[in-house]
Image (spheres, rainbow, N blue to C red):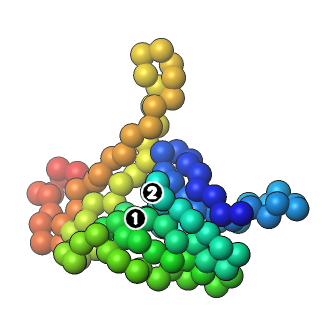
């Protein structure tokens, strides 16, 4: 069975062996969105990455390879210019866990003055 799950505010794709109950992560870095269909050999889903636009992708469940079928954008950004979100966790006023993302500044062309970071 192919499943998506969340941990620390991030989404992951995995398979679950129904006989043993073992869960195995698929396609590290790929974050599934709302739509997912699967056959015994492939999963087709809408997913994103931290540095690429969302896309319709097909995942080979045996080889764990990802093929982009259709991207949501043709705009290509250099990875050095895209802030990669970091999951953070803190408590709210009632002590409940809250998740957020911190996007540290990132630019291939600019740097902070010495001593500012």
What residue lies at 11% left-to-right and 57% top-to-bottom? 113
What residue lies at 21% left-to-right and 69% top-to-bottom? 81
The local secondary structure at tag 2 comes to strand
Q: Is residue 49 left or right of residue 77?
A: right
Closer to the camera in the image, 59 or 107: 59
Closer to the camera in the image, 43 or 30: 43
Up-down: is 90 above or below 95? Answer: below
Crowdedness of circle 1 by 10 Å Cα count: few (<14), some, many (20+)? many
2 or 1: tag closer to the N-terminus: 2
Residue 39 showing in the rendered view = yes
Residue 64 position, x and y percent, is: 61, 79
Residue 47 position, x and y percent, is: 43, 64
Mark 2 → mark 1, Cα distance in angstroms: 7 Å
Residue 51 showing in the rendered view = no
Q: Pointers 2 and 1 in contact (CB under 8 A)?
A: yes
Closer to the camera in the image, 69 or 64: 69
User: Which residue is denoted by mark 2 in the rendering?
Assistant: 33
Up-down: is 14 above or below 66? Answer: above
User: Which residue is denoted by mark 1 in the rendering?
Assistant: 48
The local secondary structure at tag 1 comes to strand
The N terminus sits in image quarter: bottom right
Q: Nearer the viewer, mark 2 or mark 1?
A: 2
What residue lies at 55% left-to-right and 58% top-to-bottom? 12
Q: Number of callouts in the render?
A: 2
Crowdedness of circle 2 by 10 Å Cα count: few (<14), some, many (20+)? some
What residue lies at 45% left-to-right and 31% top-to-bottom? 98
Residue 74 position, x and y percent, is: 22, 77
């Amino acid at each position: 069975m192919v499943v998506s799950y969340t941990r620390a505010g991030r989404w992951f794709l995995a398979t679950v062996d129904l006989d043993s109950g073992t869960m195995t992560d698929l396609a590290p870095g790929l974050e599934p969105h709302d739509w997912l269909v699967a056959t015994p050999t492939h999963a087709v889903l809408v997913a994103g990455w931290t540095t690429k636009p969302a896309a319709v992708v097909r995942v080979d469940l045996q080889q764990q390879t990802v093929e982009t079928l259709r991207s949501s954008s043709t705009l290509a950004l250099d990875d050095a210019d895209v802030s990669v979100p970091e999951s953070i966790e803190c408590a709210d006023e009632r002590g409940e866990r809250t998740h957020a993302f911190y996007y540290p500044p990132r630019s291939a062309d600019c740097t902070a003055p010495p001593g500012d970071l």
